[in-house]
Image (spheres, grey):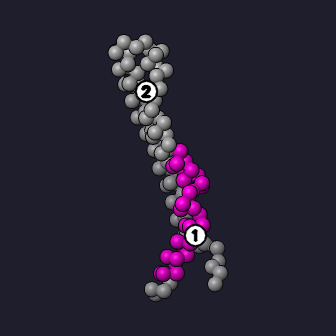
Amino acid sequence: MIMEKEFTQEQKYILARKRVEKISKFYKHLLVYVIINTFLSAIFIAGDVNDGDTFIEAFTDYHNYKIWMFWGIGIFLQVLNTFGINFIFNKKWEQQKIKKYMNEQNNIK
């Protein structure tokens, strides 16, 4: 049995809305990432300067930026997920799940 790939306008709207919500969440997360990490790096640099380092030494010390890297890995994975490159739960998997749940709903009625 071949399932048609045509969606109703309501289904298209719901899919589009979910996609926009996912993108919106990503940009909010990215903004929080930049603001928090900038604040933390400034605190770390100020602490190093207070401990006797010059500003240049403190500014170029990679330890002050480790959180950017580790949190950045999470941001990178979210980029891949949000903009279409999914590892496990890809579009094919999503379509299979949609078909499964729609078939389950049809069998209930």
Q: Earlier in the sequence, mark 2 or mark 1?
A: 2
Q: Does the magenta portion include 86?
A: yes
x, y percent for residue 31 = 47, 39
Q: Looking at the image, which residue is at 43% across and 27% down? A: 63
58 lies above or below 14: above
**Numbered label tally:** 2
Secondary structure type for disc 1: helix
Q: Does the magenta portion include 31?
A: no
91 lies above or below 36: below
x, y percent for residue 34 = 46, 35
Secondary structure type for disc 2: helix
Q: Crowding near pointer 1: few (<14 within 10 Å), some, many (20+)?
A: few
Q: Mark 2 is on which residue type?
A: Asn
Q: Residue 12, can we see it? A: no
Q: Along the horizontal axis of the image, is 45 left or right of 30?
A: left
- Secondary structure mainly formed by the magenta segment: helix
Q: Which segment did they paint magenta? A: 76-105
Q: Quadrant of the N terminus?
A: bottom right
Q: Nearer the viewer, residue 8 or 32?
A: 32
Q: Looking at the image, which residue is at 57% across and 56% down? A: 86
Spatial CA distance of label 2 from label 1 is: 44 Å
> For mark 1, what is the residue?
95
Q: Along the horizontal axis of the image, is 20 left or right of 40?
A: right
Q: Residue 66, can we see it? A: yes
> In the image, which disc is placed on residue 64?
2
Q: Mark 1 is on which residue type?
A: Gln
Q: Looking at the image, which residue is at 48% across and 86% down? A: 107
